[in-house]
Image: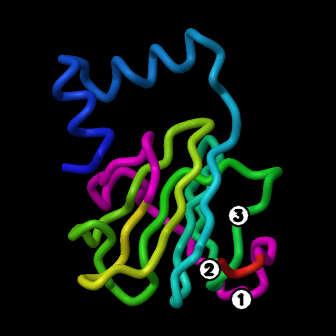
Amino acid sequence: MGTIGAWVYLAGFSRQDLRIFLHRIGLRANGHIYNRSSQPLWVIVTSPTQAFAYRLAPNHKSPDSLDADAVKSTNGTSIESDTTWYKVLDGATGEVRDAPSGLQIDCLLCYPVHYSEFNPVIYSDSTKWGTYITPE
């Protein structure tokens, strides 16, 4: 269970309760992913009827104008011991970094979801997506 899952569980709220609360307080900003790892990631951006996955290169972030909805590795490497999509709630920022046992995500409002959450997904072949960020 990720950070958000533990927090929601301890507070006695469901994830749906959290989503409703965030929308009621007006948190409807775009979600963002910063790829500070050494490998490319898939980032999902959804429309009302379709999910699109874009390849985000190392040292790049998702475009500010788009709402990043989820992230996973392109090669099956686990993020926080999970190989499914990591959901990014509205307004959240996830920073993905290399870790000894795969990848880690620093994000308060992110949690793993089942693959079916975004099916079907159209994957983009483009390798030039996102904005370059200076390595730390």
Q: Which amino acid does label 3 sit on?
A: Ser
Number of residues whose C-alpha sits closer than 10 Å to that of mark 1, classed few (under 14), some (14–19) or many (20 or more): few
Helix, strand or loop at disc 1? loop
The image shows residue 107 at horizontal and vertical percentages of 46, 50
The image shows residue 18 at horizontal and vertical percentages of 39, 22
Location of residue 28 by image quarter: top right
The image shows residue 89 at horizontal and vertical percentages of 50, 39
Helix, strand or loop at disc 2? strand
Q: Which quarter of the rendered picture does the C terminus lie within?
A: bottom right
Read off the residue under disc 1: 127
Left-right relation of 132 to 50: right
Read off the residue under disc 2: 55
Read off the residue under disc 3: 62
- Report the residue at 69% width, 41% height from top: 30
The magenta region covers: 106-133
The image shows residue 86 at horizontal and vertical percentages of 39, 57
Q: Earlier in the sequence, mark 1 or mark 3?
A: 3
Location of residue 58 by image quarter: bottom right
Q: What residue type is labelled 1?
A: Thr
Q: Earlier in the sequence, mark 2 or mark 3?
A: 2
Whether pointer 2 and pointer 3 mark residues with C-beta atoms closer than 8 Å, the reply is no
Helix, strand or loop at disc 3? loop
Position above or below: 95 against 136: above
Whether pointer 1 and pointer 2 mark residues with C-beta atoms closer than 8 Å, the reply is yes
Give the distance between the C-alpha atoms of the residues marked 1 and 2, in whole angstroms: 6 Å
Position above or below: 73 against 79: below
Location of residue 114 by image quarter: bottom left
Is 50 or 25 nearer to us in this picture? 25
Number of residues whose C-alpha sits closer than 10 Å to that of mark 2, classed few (under 14), some (14–19) or many (20 or more): many
Q: Earlier in the sequence, mark 1 or mark 2?
A: 2
Which residue is situated farthest in the top direction here?
24
